[in-house]
């Protein structure tokens, strides 16, 4: 995934199925300049991490 698409998903009112390492995640924030996204697993909002947007997969 690219940073622009990740930002579109993060800003969308509709839930889009995105995975990181085959785990369903929620995109909280996207840093388009650095190509990073702050994410957390759908079932664990306290487990935040920053990852490269290229490692995210839209299902």
Image: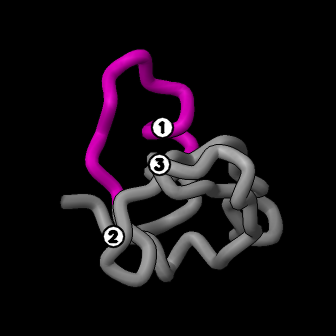
Q: Are marks 2 and 1 in contact (CB under 8 Å)?
A: no
**Helix, strand or loop status at disc 1:** helix
Q: Is residue 27 left or right of residue 14?
A: right
- Residue 36, image x and y in percent? 72, 68
- Residue 47, image x and y in percent? 70, 59
Q: Which residue is mark 2?
A: 57
**Helix, strand or loop status at disc 3:** loop
Q: Which residue is mark 3?
A: 43
Q: Is residue 41 above or below residue 21?
A: above
Q: Are marks 2 and 3 in contact (CB under 8 Å)?
A: no
Q: Residues within 10 Å of mark 2 (few under 14, many from 20)?
A: some
Give the label on residue 34, or none.
none
Q: What residue range appears in magenta?
A: 7-18
Q: Which residue is mark 1?
A: 8
Q: Is residue 29 left or right of residue 9?
A: right
**Helix, strand or loop status at disc 2:** strand
Mark-to-mark CA distance, 3 and 1: 22 Å
Q: Is residue 4 above or below residue 20?
A: above
* Most foreground residue, 47 or 7: 47
* Most foreground residue, 54 or 18: 18
Quarter-of-image position of residue 22: bottom left
Q: Nearer the viewer, mark 3 or mark 1?
A: 3
Q: Residue at x 44, y 24 (%)?
A: 12
Q: Residues within 10 Å of mark 1 (few under 14, many from 20)?
A: few
In this view, which residue lies farthest toward the left? Answer: 59
Q: Residue at x 67, y 75 (%)?
A: 51
Q: Is residue 54 left or right of residue 28?
A: left
* Most foreground residue, 35 or 59: 59
Q: Residues within 10 Å of mark 3 (few under 14, many from 20)?
A: few
Q: Quadrant of the C terminus?
A: bottom left
- Is 38 colored magenta in this rendering? no
């Amino acid at each position: 995934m690219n940073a622009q698409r990740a930002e579109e998903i993060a800003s969308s009112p509709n839930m889009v199925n995105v995975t990181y390492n085959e785990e369903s995640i929620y995109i909280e924030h996207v840093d388009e300049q650095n190509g990073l996204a702050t994410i957390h697993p759908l079932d664990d909002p306290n487990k935040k991490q920053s990852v490269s947007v290229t490692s995210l997969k839209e299902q």
